[in-house]
Amino acid sequence: MSSGLGTGAVAEAIDPSSAAGEVHSVRLDRARVVYLRDVTLHLIRRELALRHRGSLLGWLWSFSPALLQLIVTQFLFTRVIPLGVANYPVFLLTGILAWNWFAGGIRSATGVLEVSRNFVLRPGFPTFLLPLVAMLVELVDYLIALPILIGALLLTTGVSATAALLPVFIVLQLFLIAGLGLMLAPLQRFFRDVRQLVGMVVTLGFWLTPVFYRQRQVPEAFKPLYDVNPMAHLIEAERGILLSGTLPTLGSVAVIALSSLLAFAGGCFVFSALKYSLPEKL
């Protein structure tokens, strides 16, 4: 009876050089991952050190702007134009922290290639890490301010079991910002208007996203704008799981997840297509 494997296949299966080649390939891939991890951590530490060097407040600047924004906005929408939202400081802080990470992340990523020109011009350097590092530095500021939000929840509404889902939405937002950053960073080098456009969109987005008001307060005629805004869904979802212990709808989660994955895939595609032309644009 003949075997299903021919002698050539058997020889290939037991060929030690083939097995050694596969092991070598795995080791190279693992070494590459370790290298990228170490470079990313080094760049994050470097950026944080530069950001706070010579500063009197140091790490306090990580959450001071959010607290100042909270104080001013709370005054406006509780004393000047009351919105009638219960537990408004916690409600507002949830939206501010999520929005500031989004806005700061894409702003930093948009201009990072120009600021890090020496890295872009260095042969073999993984340039795609630069927008990601810019986004991750803003994530560090978000995480530093997060205990303040948790403390405020403990003093007001309490922390429900649904709050354990917050890391899921943080990861989804991470992919959303990373994708937009990878897309905008190289486009800024080809079209110098991108940075100004991003600044305008971020400014308008603050008012057109339910950062300081409820989404259900929006008139029906304008709700389609909010239905396609992933940050609107994300902030509302986080408020639900943190403040009221309610789960977001499947439709809302689908919008967030699909937007994040499409943004990340689109960002990877755009950056890959343009990365070899970046040195000549600097």
Image (cartoon, rainbow, N blue to C red):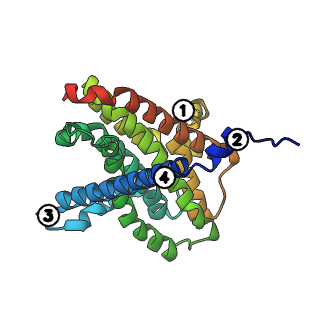
Q: Nearer the viewer, mark 4 or mark 1?
A: 4
86 vs 207, nearest the viewer: 207
Q: Residues within 10 Å of mark 1 (few under 14, many from 20)?
A: few
Q: Secondary structure at mark 2?
A: helix
Q: Which mark is residue 225?
A: 1
68 vs 195, nearest the viewer: 195
Q: Secondary structure at mark 3?
A: loop
**What amino acid type is highlighted by mark number 1?**
Leu
In this rendering, the answer to whether 158 lies above or below 121 is: below
- The N terminus, quarter of image: top right
**What amino acid type is highlighted by mark number 4?**
Val
Q: Which mark is residue 7?
A: 2
Q: Which mark is residue 26?
A: 4
Q: Which mark is residue 61?
A: none
**Horizontal relation, residue 234 to residue 69: left or right:** right
Q: Can I make out residue 55 in this image?
A: yes
Q: Nearer the viewer, mark 1 or mark 3?
A: 3
Q: Please identify the residue farthest to the left as the structure is shown.
A: 54
Q: Secondary structure at mark 4?
A: helix
| Residue annotated with mark 3 | 55
